[in-house]
Image: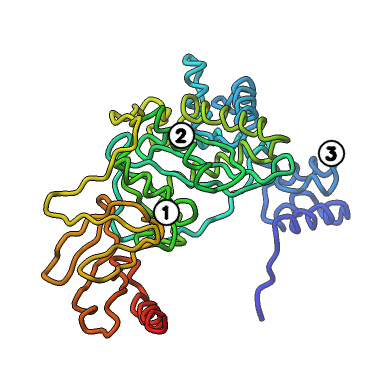
Amino acid sequence: MPWNRTEPMCERVKFISDYLKEEESFSELCENFGISRKTGYKWVSRYEAGGVEALKELSRACKTHPNATSQKIVNYILRERKKHPTWGPVKLLVVLGRRYPDLELPSPSTTGEILRRNGVVKKRRQRKVSSPHREPLRSYDAPNAVWCADFKGDFPVGGRRCSPLTISDGYSRFLLNCKALESTRFKYAQKVFESTFRMYGLPDVIRTDNGPPFSTVAPSGLSRLAIWWIKLGILPERIMPARPDQNGRHERMHRTLKAETAQPPRNSFRAQQRAFDNFRKEYNEVRPHEALGQQVPASFYSASKRPFPDKLPAITYPDSYEIQKAYPNGVISFQGTQWYVSGAVRGEWLGLRAISEDRWMVYLGHVELGIMDIRNVKKRKYRHFAHLVPTGPDARGWHGRQKSANKKCTQL
């Protein structure tokens, strides 16, 4: 048979019940319950003052805390948080420390608890993070080594769809531009990039995703915008599909941009652009950045030494290359065969580098487009038309597509 279990509260209630019966002396009553007379008188006095509820265990926490944060500092923290609803404890303390250098501020954990107690923070949903990409991307060695660009997801503004185009420097996190656009088409994006290039110069690399107008299904993902960058001496760099973490610095900025400028959206494009401009100024010059040691991005950024040219320079190739100009249909003629490259390169001068006697690598500037394999053409009956053999990620599934294309050409 198991032992009977009892709780301290139950024992106190039994003690008071037996005390009220007055069947035995107080000393015998305390002895039966295994407590001293002093403890017995304590529970009796509590019962007489507050009833059964008074028999519950009282809190042992101190009523006063000499190291508690003063209400004045709490008000400073809450007021600054109201100005910047998306800032965390560390950023709030950095800004308050600049403004009140003689003030003894609490720790970030205490500041976070103050925000939580006052109901100004929400519990963050835990996010799943994928593993990093193994293929090397360009490193953020210096300002303008890598720029990051993307379209923030569109949202309604004044009855129209707004697609903000954002450009940032990967090294300093400096937000170079944030423009509200109605479309992601090439002509709108080019104007934004041109104004950014004129103001800050040219970067070495621009990293984007695989959406328009940055990329197409052409070899090496060439688009009109990417070809324009190549002519300017800029290398287009695309992350892998479904891997926004490879452009994580820019994507993290987008989350802050959305929270501070698009929730809720403004009532017109002009008002929305003002919100973007105000955010950009605060983000670059006021908001501390944890990855920069709580410094602002503007203190780490300097303009590029490569200015935007007044005239678009022509693409040059080494003397050892064969030079061919693409026809308006994206085809080049070489050794009696019409080689289809892409409609994206129509009218462009392409460079051909000999890999072996019968194989040539085709370039647009310093970007590989594919290989002309003359050996495969010689084996075919239909030798007047052929496709490049893609290199890199574009080569996936190429042989199946090539077989289908050759069949169509034979039927012409």
Between label 2 and label 1, give the one nearer the viewer: 1
**Distance from label 2 to label 1 (Cα)?**
24 Å
Name the mark on residue 223: 1
Q: Which residue is mark 2?
A: 175
Residue designated by label 3: 49
Q: Which of 282 and 401 lies nearest the eye of the viewer?
A: 401
Q: From the top left corner, tell me how far across and down residue 251 is, in percent.
A: 48, 47
Tell me the mark number nearer the camera, choosing from 3 and 2.
2
Label 3 vs 1, first from the N-terminus = 3
Residue drawn where x is 35% and y is 73% of the image: 396
- Category of crowding for the residue at label 1, using alpha-carbon neighbours closer than 10 angstroms: few (below 14), some (14–19), many (at least 20): many
Asked which secondary structure carries label 1, the reply is loop
Q: How many marks?
A: 3
- How much space separates mark 3 and mark 1, taking CA atoms? 84 Å
For the C terminus, which image quadrant? bottom left
- Residue at the image position 55 percent from the left and 46 percent from the top: 152
Quadrant of the rendering where the N terminus is positioned:
bottom right
Horizontal side of 235 relative to 20 (left or right) equals left
Estimate the spatial distance between the alpha carbons at disc 3 and disc 2, rounded to whole Å. 66 Å
Task: Pick whichever of labels 3 and 2 is earlier in the sequence.
Answer: 3
Q: Is residue 357 visible?
A: yes
Q: Is residue 295 visible?
A: no
Q: Is residue 89 left or right of residue 147?
A: right
Q: How is the image coloured?
A: rainbow
